Image: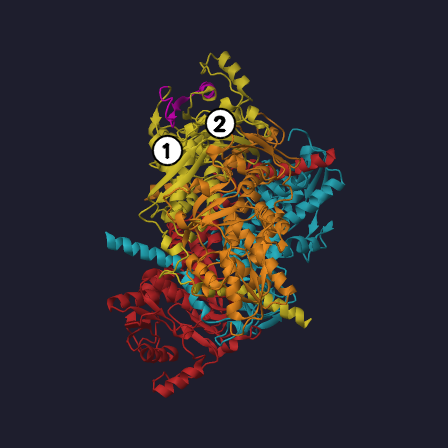
Chain colours: A red, B cyan, C yellow, D orange
């Protein structure tokens, strides 16, 4: 970046990092800085609210990913990965409205978030300059920030330092770093925010019929503790709480089990690894994500109906599913005769399905005999 | 089958169906019938034992599938799908030893098991004739069998009729049919055999460090209730208990999370759908399963170490993992500076990763401007 | 089929087989038989025309497959595979219009066409009964048919017997069987219909700028001679001439090379094997084909422009491509400096792209040192 | 790189760039520089030979890729992509032997080669420092280099400047840049080195029976002219001549067509896009390439036999294939009856294969009736 920025829109969270960044930007670039804050949280709205993107977040990011049952490395429901493009899109639109030429975020230089923010900026408005202070300045950690803040009289939020960092939005809360770095140690129980432990969950099961409400936390559902692969190339341990998302995903898969064709489901399932990877890596605004989304949305035309779940001490068990569009009909599947399925057909089916295996073995045997 | 069989090897379970089949074969074909029984169960060995294949079952079928984290339609751990080729292989070998020209099984004409048995027969010894009585005779259900047994004085096992059918082996027990056909109804608690319900599981968590023992059932782990897609073309509801297999799979995935390369894991994960499909459909003895197995086994060279799990009321939670071959090193992943990772590298990484997105948008914008 | 059919719609080609089938149906079932003939050929329309489906064929079947660059086993452009669902759809609609309860086709019991016809019937109107004479009657070949025709005074087309069978439509002509069964022998030159051999093609190259016209045959383009895998389980040799389709596919791929995003292209390419398989196997009217089609069509939004080709003696060489929607800009790709791409970015890109490889080796080396 | 390098091993080609780089390294770092040159060319060995890696190149890189029929974006046979890891491996081994701490290459900062060299260095010996002069120095093109060479009295090779750059090895020659940047213009005929144009090829066809010799160039085979997607994010036009490789690939695919199982082939084909991408992007020395290679090599156990080809004016046509391990047997595929295949089996096969399509339509129709 050769030219000096004239007006910077900073993705502002209200925490220590972005508070310091705000001051540092003004000092370093001597230009106007706009703090852009979004509300993806249900609570905490009383702190700083500039834009409430909860509806956009759910409608444009969470639902599309849920339609794919998207999950990263079999575990992570992508709560942060979906929030970042939501914020970036809002920030880019704000930058355009306000005539800013530069955008800025507070993500560090070793994580996934920097990629998610900046790929979104590049895809949506490539003319914007990007400042990522953590990759530029000399500060190396919280201590440096605190000292700088003191020396510059920057008011910083008075939060107790926690032995890990966390990020929360409507869909989940994530934890990483600090004491979590030892993968042989269990996370401390008082770290968790959205869910009780299964041990402390009610002793009675809760049955719900899904109308897609956020009921999971009190039953101890949706905790995940994994070592995951970051896009920037190293492994990292993360702990997540996603109670509502977990329940919705289980319910959605149960709904699909009676309404989606077998081949459609298997082909889609084989692509979910790739789809979740795209989201995790930061490629939400990309033609490849849109391409897969077009396919995934096509599979959902018949997915409607009701699912009943038993929530009990960390378990989210499907106990019933029914649908007007059901492809399941016990008359076809049971062992009694029916008109659609003739048991004798199975002989021909098996004989031709196995023909290539049979031919291969016959030819092999005849070669051995000749030798 | 034009020629009459001379000697038939029947896959014999000791239940009503195969007891009747044995008599029916002798009456219908007037030839020798050998009852081939295998023991894939830990208990019940006192009933009929001809061949104990438990070790082969685990070593040659269960472990290879576990190495892939194989799971069908995100739920089913393939307990029966893995047992069928085990039995079929033993049966074919027995047929060869005894000079039999025909093999026979008691699977019905609407299920997956007929396919699994017969594809294995065809792949292993295509010269054998195959008899599948349920697709040939006139009997339509249990009542017909009982009547035939009475009229022929066939001794049948005196078991109480259950309102569902089940199949058990060392890895799991499955339930289907009867009262389970209504997908809106929860299975009755007294149906389950290997696991208590989460509600009845101990109130204290059990911590285990995996040495791969079968500890799961008492903690209510491993129950699955799904509507699945049969290979023969219809949807079917199945309920499964696989306590040990579930724990092993969770532990294996946690072990892989610190020992397997990111790209290796993602590519493999994208193929597990297809691999599990092969096993479920009956293609264990096929070149395509062997091809994927060669790839999967290649990925496991570094998968060793220890995993610690918390088992509590249906939950199987990973709380620790460590390995001599670990690729996880907190020094690389944390936010402090280190020698391997330079935060400034991230800028170039992101700028080139997003270059195609940026170019596409720039060209689109310049076209719009020209118009 | 227990009930006798009342009215049968026969997919009628005018050849020996369907001429005999027509008579045989009347004799065997004593019911009304409607001959349903379609015209997918450019010429030959003067023989029997009931319905001209050339436009539907191209618009609803050929173009969608071309958008995917669909090809079976790297060679076959699916000319017959696309024609069968076209005919079946027309036939089913005719059956409904005429109140017929049964449909019939003349495909043999060992090929792919029977599957393609019948899966389409089942998917479109599962209530129709299906008669496949070649799987029912006693006749085993052409000789039997000729004799039956003579004995019943059935007028049969007086065509010279060829030492192979062939099938032609607007897109291609295929050859199989007879002298082609020996895979070590080259097909005779006088067999080919739509294309001259490269040796006999004009000595001057023809340059065309694609406006999607059928110019290929005179330049010896589009011949394929392969051993392919049939869906029913055996390998089979087929020879095809698809001059126009080959040129269109080459041109389409060149058009995509400057207008389609890299990731979109690679992901799509990885699915073409599966997409072509679906068409070849007969699953045109299936939710899985529609699902992939939705994705493929999404990729085509920007595919427009001009391609120039050199057609010369069997070669179809792209010599120019340009587009209003081009993503190619020599300013980005050349080795001189520009504003979008900073060469220094490559260092960070490579360092992070290789980080996991570096870490794995470093940890391996440090383990070896410790030992 | 904070510390100064002590000894640098430069991948030296003998051209202008690396001649200047050699002098520049000595001037800039004041340390020992070793010129490491490899011979991957058949001719030209009289110029500079330090190490002859032709056998390693073919055995360890070209053959493994050929076993996969690897091709990038349906066109490019990866000649350069395979040469780079060959050189890098030799260079790293030389660096170790000579106690060097640094490696250097002459690839520019906008291409794929820098990535291929450096990922290989990182994977094989992460302790080595890497210098990429084109990303460091001020020179922007050939003119700057010539001037610097003159000012420093660096002897540079006296080659006529060509209006494009090229790279040649045993497998292929590639051309890019300069006049090739206009994708609407055909490359000039006098640019090509390994192959005559189809127009100038002999008027008689050459028949060969593959014993894997390099016979292609004189028949005008193996030219490719594409716009391809670079790993660093932009599209680029490349022209390639790979006569021998093209013939080998065609022959190999024909050999596989009669010796490889259908499912094995289709699954493998679906992964070739990804495998070729890995090689093109520079990930030869990666666990994911090794994983796919293990699978691919497993598929080749039965691939042996003879293929006969007709080479004529750019065409490489398979006219015969035979093998001791052939899975093709005309007795199975022809329309006459045989013992392995019973035509009646096809009915059951089709009825069950289409069952899910039939059920879906039946349920849809019954819902419509009820409404």
Residue C346 to residue C131: above or below: below
| Mark 2 vs 1, N-terminal side | 1
Tell me where residue D75 appears, x and y as whole percent: 47, 44
Q: Is residue C37 magenta?
A: yes
Task: Judge from the rendering whether residue A371 lies leftward or rightward of residue D288; answer left or right.
Answer: right
Nearer to us in this view, B128 or B288:
B288
SS under mark 2: helix
Q: For the point 62% across and 59% down, which residue is it? A: B300
Crowding at mark 2 (Cα within 10 Å: few <14, some 14-19, many 20+): some
What is the quadrant of residue B118 in the picture? top right
What is the quadrant of residue D299 in the picture? top right
Return the chain for callout 2.
Answer: C
Tell me where residue D330 appears, x and y as whole percent: 60, 29
Count of marks, rendered view: 2
Nearer to us in this view, A321 or D59:
D59
In the image, the segment drawn in magenta is: C19-46
Q: CA distance from mark 2 to mark 1?
A: 32 Å
| The N terminus of chain B: image quadrant | top right
Q: Which residue is mark 1?
A: C57
Tell me where residue D82 appears, x and y as whole percent: 55, 51
Do circles 2 and 1 both sit on a common chain? yes
Task: Judge from the rendering whether residue B296 lies leftward or rightward of residue B49; answer left or right.
Answer: left
SS under mark 1: helix
Q: Which numbered disc covers residue B73? A: none
Return the chain for callout 1.
Answer: C
Nearer to us in this view, D56 or D52:
D52
Q: Is residue A141 magenta?
A: no
Tell me where residue A135 appears, x and y as whole percent: 42, 73
Q: Nearer the viewer, mark 2 or mark 1?
A: 2
Q: Which residue is mark 2?
A: C199
């Amino acid at each position: 970046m050769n030219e000096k920025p004239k007006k910077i829109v900073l993705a502002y969270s209200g925490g220590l990092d972005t508070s310091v960044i705000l001051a540092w930007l003004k000092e370093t670039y001597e230009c106007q800085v706009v703090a852009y804050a979004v509300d993806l949280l249900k609570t905490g709205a009383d702190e700083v609210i500039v834009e409430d993107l909860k509806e956009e977040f759910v409608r444009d990011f969470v639902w599309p990913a849920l339609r794919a049952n998207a999950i990263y490395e079999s575990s992570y429901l992508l709560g942060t990965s979906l929030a970042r493009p939501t914020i970036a899109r809002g920030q880019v639109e704000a930058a355009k409205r306000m005539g800013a030429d530069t955008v800025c975020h507070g993500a560090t230089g070793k994580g996934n978030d920097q990629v998610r923010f900046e790929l979104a900026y590049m895809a949506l408005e490539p003319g914007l300059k990007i400042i990522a202070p953590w990759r530029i300045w000399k500060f190396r950690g919280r201590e440096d920030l605190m000292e700088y803040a003191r020396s510059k009289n920057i008011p910083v939020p008075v939060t107790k330092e926690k032995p890990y960092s966390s990020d929360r939005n409507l869909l989940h809360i994530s934890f990483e770093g600090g004491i979590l770095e030892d993968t042989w140690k269990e996370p401390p129980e008082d770290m968790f925010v959205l869910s009780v432990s299964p041990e402390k969950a009610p002793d009675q099961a809760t049955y719900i019929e899904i109308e897609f409400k956020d009921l999971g936390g009190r039953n101890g559902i949706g905790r995940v503790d994994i070592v995951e692969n970051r896009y920037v190339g190293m492994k990292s341990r993360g702990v997540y709480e996603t109670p509502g998302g977990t329940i919705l995903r289980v319910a959605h898969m149960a709904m699909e089990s009676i309404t989606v064709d077998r081949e459609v489901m298997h082909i889609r399932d084989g692509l979910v690894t790739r789809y979740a990877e795209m989201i995790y890596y930061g490629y939400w605004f990309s033609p490849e994500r849109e391409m897969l989304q077009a396919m995934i949305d096509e599979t959902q035309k018949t997915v409607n109906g009701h699912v009943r779940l038993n929530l009990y001490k960390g378990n989210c068990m499907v106990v019933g599913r029914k649908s007007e569009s059901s492809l399941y009909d016990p008359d076809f599947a049971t062992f009694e005769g029916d008109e659609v399925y003739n048991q004798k057909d199975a002989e021909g089916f098996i004989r031709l399905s196995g023909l290539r295996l049979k031919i291969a073995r016959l030819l092999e045997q005849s070669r051995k005999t000749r030798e």
